[in-house]
Image: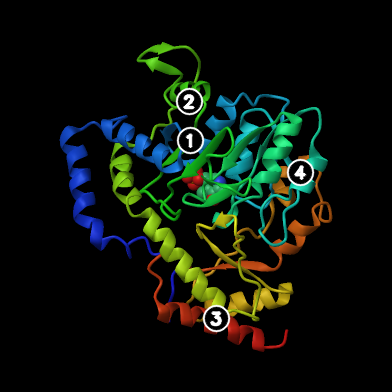
Amino acid sequence: MKVPMVDMLAGYPPIKDEIEAAVKNVFNKANFILGEEVKKFEAEFAAHNGAKFCVGVANGTDALRMAYLASGIKAGDEVITSPFTFIATTETITQVGAVPVFADIDPVTFCLDPKSVEKKITKKTRAIAPVHLYGHPCDMDALMALAKKHNLLVIEDTAQAFTGKYKLGGTDWKMLGSIGQCGTYSFFPAKNLGAFGDGGAIVTSDQKIYDTLIQLRNHGSKVRYHHEMEGFNSRLDTVQAAILSIRLKHVEKWTEMRNKVAEKYAAALKGVCVTPVVPANARHSFNYYTIRFDSKAKRDNAQKHLTELGIANQIYYPITLHLQEAYKHLGYKRGDLPVCDAVQDTVFSLPMYPELSDEQIKAVTDAVKESVKVAV
Ligand SMILES: *Cc1c(COP(=O)(O)O)cnc(C)c1O
């Protein structure tokens, strides 16, 4: 049975008419740039995240770059982050003139290990950029405590984790992205809240950061042709905002469905490989469902078997950033971050989307089980 990694159209039929009407409405008004649908979506998205403000931007990468800039990160600063992420997290650190500093990850959650972060703090450190990888929350209690102790900013890369939650201090449920100074999101189609094209957003409850972001995304201007600073052309499209408003109403239900798929995967794969752990103080948003094997050979073998059967699969991420050609000048080598080394060699991700059927789940888990029976 063929199973795709994601199926953007599986959840489309029930909302098709509503989306097409909303798009037509934007076309009829021709308010394509910063139309009222953008403001409306920003208000809804901020409220959903329990944040004061949201700024819609062109994509999740721009969201990161502008969040770093608006928080005051500048040339010569260091930002500590995970190398087990997409390069957008770190290329944008470099693009604002700062230096990404890589810390190791936790072997169970695959997110930043606060103990490793603490060892990387220097006089130049300005911020920590936790990445809630695959939708799993980072250890925000420990990271926020470190930030407080060393007077650092926290910018959360929430591209994979919208609708994920964390119980701060063991009592206070917070949406991921609303814990640090800023949280950044991507509406790339395959993310939990996907647009029908590119899109992104930043949430913050800091008025000054918000004011700066509003300017940065629109050439540094609040009033047309009056520029208090230089900025970018990075606005959330009105058509995408109209679509996102509609999809936002369903996203919590979709996350529940993702969690159900994850439970079924975990039940079927018990004792076969390591499946994701969801601690009591967290809600995982399962943008990706990642499994781990006890050897690279077993991982490679399982991947090969699934591919032969037409079951999509992907390693997120096959080469951690500290070992990429692009970061050679930073001087990291294998052995510097041992957990990252081990994890990149032994994980891969299974198909994951809300509408995945029981038959599809069985086909996927049967294939994984078959693959581990073969001695490698
Ligand atoms: C997708 C992603 C981004 C970038 O988002 P785009 O909208 O594709 O620019 C940033 N960080 C992480 C962790 C991502 O997965």
Residue where numbered disc 3 is placed? 268
Q: Amino acid at mark 1?
A: Val
Q: Residues within 10 Å of mark 2 (few under 14, many from 20)?
A: many
Colour scheme in use: rainbow
Quarter of the image where one finds residue 274 = bottom right
Q: Quadrant of the C terminus?
A: bottom right
Which numbered disc, 4 or 1, marks the residue that appears first in the sequence?
4
Which numbered disc, 2 or 3, marks the residue that appears first in the sequence?
2
**Residue positioned 52% across, 26% down in the render:** 206
Residue 90, horizontal then vertical, whole percent: 64, 41
Left or right side of 366 for 22: left
Left or right side of 352 for 142: right
Residue where numbered disc 4 is placed? 117
**Residue positioned 50% across, 57% down in the render:** 285
| Pointer 4 with pointer 1, Cβ within 8 A | no
* Res. 5 in view: no
Residue 60, horizontal then vertical, whole percent: 49, 42
Residue 304, horizontal then vertical, whole percent: 60, 77
Residue where numbered disc 1 is placed? 203
Q: Amino acid at mark 4?
A: Val
From this view, report whether residue 183 is shown above or below residue 352: above
Q: How far apart are the two marked residues, 4 and 1, measured between alpha carbons? A: 24 Å
Residue 359, horizontal then vertical, whole percent: 41, 81
Residue where numbered disc 2 is placed? 210
| Pointer 1 with pointer 3, Cβ within 8 A | no
Q: How far apart are the two marked residues, 2 and 3, measured between alpha carbons? A: 46 Å
Q: Quadrant of the N terminus?
A: bottom left
Mark number displayed over residue 3: none
Mark 4: which secondary structure?
helix
Q: How far apart are the two marked residues, 1 and 3, measured between alpha carbons? A: 37 Å
| Pointer 1 with pointer 2, Cβ within 8 A | no
